Image (spheres, rainbow, N blue to C red):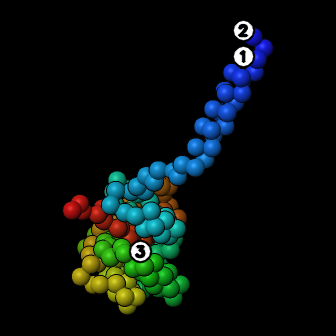
Amino acid sequence: MEEGSMGRLLWKWSAACWLAIGLAACQSPVQQPAAPGLSPEQVQVLRSHGFEDQGGSWALMMPSKLLFAVDTDQLGSQQADYVNQLAQDLKRVGIQSVRVEGHTDDTGPVLYNQQLSERRAQRVAEQLVRAGMDPLQISTRGWGNSKPLPMAQGQDARRENRRVAIIIPAPVGP
């Protein structure tokens, strides 16, 4: 191959590479849906509050924000503030429907724990309503001590199980 041909070939190859790089840089990335039925902004808000995708539904996975003392269904002021902020953020991004699930530890009679878990869920739901969420879009459920968190035994496990979980149900299609 002649020296001039080699130079032109190298120049063409170099130009083609730079053109390809330039075109790639101009391309905007393809937006993949963050979660079926939810906008990226909604997913960002959920994740910022500690929610995790549970196969379409989103569950609040930071239980320390909604833990209860032994034998009580009362929210502390920090918990109420957190629920208020959560409600505002959910409303801001158009998430309206929530499910609130109360739980207890394994001490005490089964029937009493069931009723206590229902009252805990109801207290959190009431706080969501005070923060402006539609009560018709909030469902509550008490599980008593039937759904303990999978963790070590002892007092820490009991404390973590005195909780309320907030679930964002999977959006239903059109």
- Residue 127, percent from left and from top: 39, 86
Whether 161 is drawn above or below 33: the answer is below
Q: Quadrant of the N terminus?
A: top right
10 Å crowding of disc 3: few (<14), some (14-19), many (20+): some
Lateral position of residue 73 relative to residue 76, left or right:
left
Residue at image x 42%, y 68%?
42
- Ranked by sequence position, the earlier of labels 2 and 3 is 2
Figure check: 99 above or below 170: below
Amino acid residing under circle 3: Val
Q: Which residue is mark 1?
A: 5
Nearer to me, 36 or 101: 36
Which residue sits furthest right? 3
SS for tag 3?
Answer: loop
Q: Which residue is mark 3?
A: 93
Pointers 1 and 2 in contact (CB under 8 A)?
A: yes
Residue 143 placement (x, y as % from top left):
29, 68
Q: Which residue is tagged 2?
A: 1
Q: Position of residue 94 (x, y in %)?
A: 37, 75
Graded by Cα atoms within 10 Å as few (under 14), some (14 to 19) or many (20 or more), the crowding at tag 2 reads few
Answer with left or right where residue 168 lies relative to residue 63: left
Front residue (pair 47, 25): 25
Cα distance between the residues tagged 1 and 2: 7 Å
Tell me the kind of residue under disc 1.
Ser
Mark closer to the observer (1, 3):
1
Residue 97 visible in rendering: yes
CA neighbours of label 1 inside 10 A, class few (<14), some (14 to 19), many (20+): few
Query: At x 63% / y 32%, what residue is drawn?
Result: 16
Q: CA distance from mark 1 to mark 3?
A: 61 Å
Relative height, residue 26 to residue 92 (above, below): above
Residue at left offset 52%, top offset 52%: 28
